[in-house]
Amino acid sequence: MARFRVNGKEHQLDIEPDMPLLWALRDELGLSGTKFGCGVAACGACTVQVNGNPVRSCVTPVSAVEGSDITTIEGLAVNASLTPVQQAWIDHQVPQCGYCQSGMIMAVSALLASNPSPSDAEIDGAISNVCRCGTYPRIRQAIRSLRASA
């Protein structure tokens, strides 16, 4: 039995303790915003926040998040209002295919929550997500726009 909160709602799931959090979110809870990319925690498409920290859900067993607060991309916007990071993504036209963007947004949101004015080196150190479309210049521009307003 796995117990945790996802996007503010308590869940108790009768699943194996070694099931990756990614599959619990997608298959058991129907939250498809978190994407499967590589399955080895390299690409970051599966990034969610666990107690406010970015975590690669494809390699995190549900037993490791017992009792935790988990936030997925579906849980960021409150009352249908975009977060500043989501709005910056639109303003700077970050996505191309968009596949990696939910994980990228989760990682950037966690970074800015802990460090509202990161340096370029801190951005590089914290954001290791892969964007196969290569929108890194626009990603950095969007983060810098948020950093400037922080």
Image: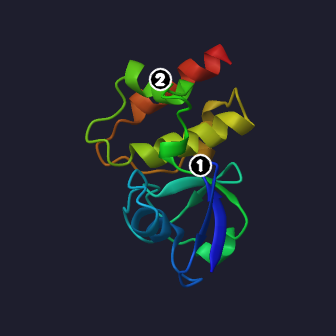
Amino acid marked by disc 1: Asn
Relative to 56, does residue 52 appear above or below in the rendering?
above
Say which quarter of the image contains residue 1: bottom right
| 9 or 25: nearer the viewer | 9
Instruction: Let me know if residue 121 appears in the view.
Output: yes
Q: Position of residue 69 (x, y in %)?
A: 68, 55
Residue 116 screen position, x and y as percent: 70, 28
x%, y% of residue 34? Answer: 43, 54
Mark 2 lies on residue: 88
| Relative vertical location of residue 42 with respect to residue 16 in this rendering, above or below | above
Mark 2 secondary-structure assignment: helix
- Mark on residue 101? none
**Labels 2, 1: front one:** 1
Q: Is residue 35 left or right of residue 116?
A: left
Residue tagged 1: 7
The amino acid beneath tag 2 is: Ala
Q: Give the distance between the C-alpha atoms of the residues marked 2 and 1, in whole angstroms.
A: 22 Å
**Between disc 2 and disc 1, whose residue precedes?**
1
Q: Coloured how?
A: rainbow
Q: Residue 76, located in which quarter of the rendered image?
A: top right
